């Protein structure tokens, strides 16, 4: 019994010592392998594998409080000039030609350097007459009221006292802007002692420049030809146009007193023909409009704001008001628009904008016609009054259009009387 216990204890101790020996040997092997790997990494740092235990690289950040200015990356292109071509040895001296080439090349370099320094966001300065321009810039200017050319009439006056006749020699006319195929003539009217005498030239095909070379003869009272300074009368000359639809229109007219004939005798007279004035009639109300023109978009904006003082017998039964707008180019209708209807108000308010596409080169010959309508019954529109805006009109219509041309991209508002 004692022997068996001793044997069991010895076996147990032997097993425990064997296990501890094996653990010690395994730990020793692991430590040896780890030491070899660390020594290899130190010898060849390029082959060292990244590890999460490696220290992070420290970056130094410098703070700056100075503002950062944006710099344009685009530059103006360099502009090169063609060199003068040599056509013949006898014509051009080589020394002078070479010197001119050198100076032109130097000027070109300075021009290119100046161009390279300019950025896209800076406006180029205007070169003086002595400087050599780096580039030529062509821009299409919009039509303004000062650039409008009215028709001009060239005529002369002679007075025949023996026969008591006033002769007006119509020589020519310039700056006539009409559609192709239109014809026209010059008419004259002399008003003396509440009596009017008319005469006109032959009909010619209208163009920018038209030659007439005709005389208009008017008979005057014999006693008035002896003393022309005391004449009480008026002479009117008008340029008329008749299109292919037989629509007659007045392009321009001028007036002068008979008392001024003595100063105009045997002289070449050039006169600007002004648009005809509207007949003075009582207005049926007023319409407030606002105009603006956008040259970049070629759009005309018309704001129909409100009306006041509408007076008509057509408003007794029913009040249902609207405004119809018509855009015209000479005699052709380009666009029609109409506002909403406002009921039961004698001073209606619309505040509606209408955008119309109109190129800038057509502004001088275009006009806007606005008409106030009342819906008396279903399907029955009765006109109450109208107004026109354009360079061919007069009064507030002409004034408003000129202000719009002189102030592009701005809203210009004005009251316009309405006429039947």
Image: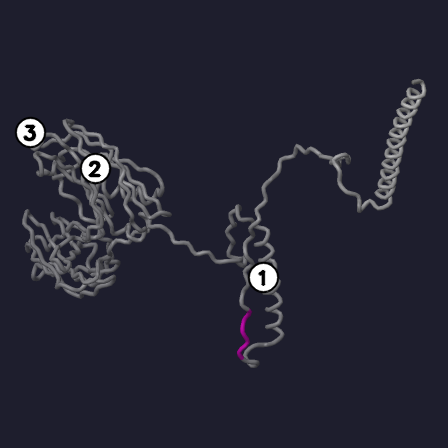
Is residue 1 placed above or below 419 in the rendered structure? above
Q: Which residue is mark 1?
A: 108
Q: Nearer the viewer, residue 29 or 276?
A: 29
The image's mark for residue 339 is 2
- Give the percent coordinates (x, y) of residue 235: 14, 52
Identify the residue at horizontal 57%, vertical 80% (top origin).
89
* Magenta-drawn segment: 83-87
Q: Please indicate, yes or no, whether residue 141 appears anywhere in the rendered image.
A: yes
Residue ID for mark 3:
317
Left-right relation of 92 to 178 = right
Q: Secondary structure at mark 3?
A: loop
* Mark 1 secondary-structure assignment: helix
Main SS category, magenta section: loop
Q: Residues within 10 Å of mark 1 (few under 14, many from 20)?
A: some
Q: Position of residue 382 (x, y in %)?
A: 9, 38
86 inside magenta stretch: yes
**Considering depth in this image, is 66 or 415 the residue closer to the camera?**
66
Hey, which quadrant is residue 21 in on the image? top right
Left or right of residue 250, residue 353 in this image:
right
Q: Is the residue 380 above or below the residue 218 in the image?
A: above
Work out which quarter of the rendered image holds the C terminus and state it.
top left
If you read the primary sequence from the N terminus, does the residue marked by circle 2 or circle 1 appear first?
1
How far apart in space, not on screen, are marks 3 and 2 (Cα)?
21 Å
- Give the mark nearer the N terminus: 1 vs 3: 1
Is residue 267 among the parts visible in the rendering? no
Q: Quadrant of the N terminus?
A: top right
In the rendered structure, the answer to whether residue 266 lies left or right of residue 28 reads left
């Amino acid at each position: 019994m004692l022997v068996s216990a001793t044997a069991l204890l010895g076996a147990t101790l032997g097993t425990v010592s064997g296990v501890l020996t094996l653990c010690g040997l395994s730990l020793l092997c692991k430590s040896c392998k780890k030491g070899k790997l660390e020594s290899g990494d130190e010898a060849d740092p390029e082959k060292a594998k990244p590890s999460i235990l490696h220290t992070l690289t420290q970056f130094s950040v410098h703070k700056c409080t100075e503002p950062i200015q944006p710099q344009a990356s685009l530059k103006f292109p360099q502009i090169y000039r063609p060199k003068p071509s040599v056509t013949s040895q006898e014509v051009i001296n080589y020394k002078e030609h070479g010197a001119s080439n050198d100076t032109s090349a130097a000027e070109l370099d300075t021009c290119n350097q100046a161009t390279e320094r300019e950025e896209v966001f800076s406006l180029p300065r205007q070169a003086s007459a002595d400087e050599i321009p780096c580039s030529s810039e062509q821009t299409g200017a919009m039509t303004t009221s000062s650039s409008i050319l009215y028709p001009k009439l060239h005529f002369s006056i002679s007075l025949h006292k023996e026969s008591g006749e006033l002769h007006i020699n119509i020589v020519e006319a310039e700056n006539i802007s009409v559609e192709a195929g239109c014809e026209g003539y010059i008419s004259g009217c002399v008003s003396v002692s509440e009596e009017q005498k008319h005469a006109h030239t032959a009909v010619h095909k209208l163009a920018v420049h038209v030659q007439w070379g005709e005389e208009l003869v008017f008979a005057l009272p014999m006693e008035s030809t002896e003393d022309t300074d005391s004449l009480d009368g008026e002479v009117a000359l008008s340029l008329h146009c008749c299109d292919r639809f037989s629509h007659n229109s007045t392009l321009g007219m001028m007036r002068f007193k008979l008392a001024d004939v003595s100063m105009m005798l045997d002289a070449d007279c050039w006169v600007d023909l002004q648009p005809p004035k509207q007949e003075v009639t009582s207005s049926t109300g007023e319409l407030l409009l606002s105009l603006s023109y956008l040259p970049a978009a070629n759009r005309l904006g018309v704001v129909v704001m409100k009306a006041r003082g509408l007076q008509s017998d057509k408003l007794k039964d029913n009040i249902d008001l609207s405004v119809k707008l018509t855009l015209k180019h000479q005699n052709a209708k380009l666009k029609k628009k109409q506002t909403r209807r406002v009921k039961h108000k004698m001073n209606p308010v619309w505040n509606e904008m209408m955008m119309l596409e109109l190129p800038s080169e057509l502004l001088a010959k275009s006009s806007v016609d606005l008409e106030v309508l009342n819906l008396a019954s279903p399907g029955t529109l009765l006109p109450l009054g109208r107004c026109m805006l354009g360079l061919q009109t007069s009064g507030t219509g002409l004034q408003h259009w000129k202000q719009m041309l002189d102030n592009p991209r701005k809203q210009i508002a004005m009251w316009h009387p309405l006429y039947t």
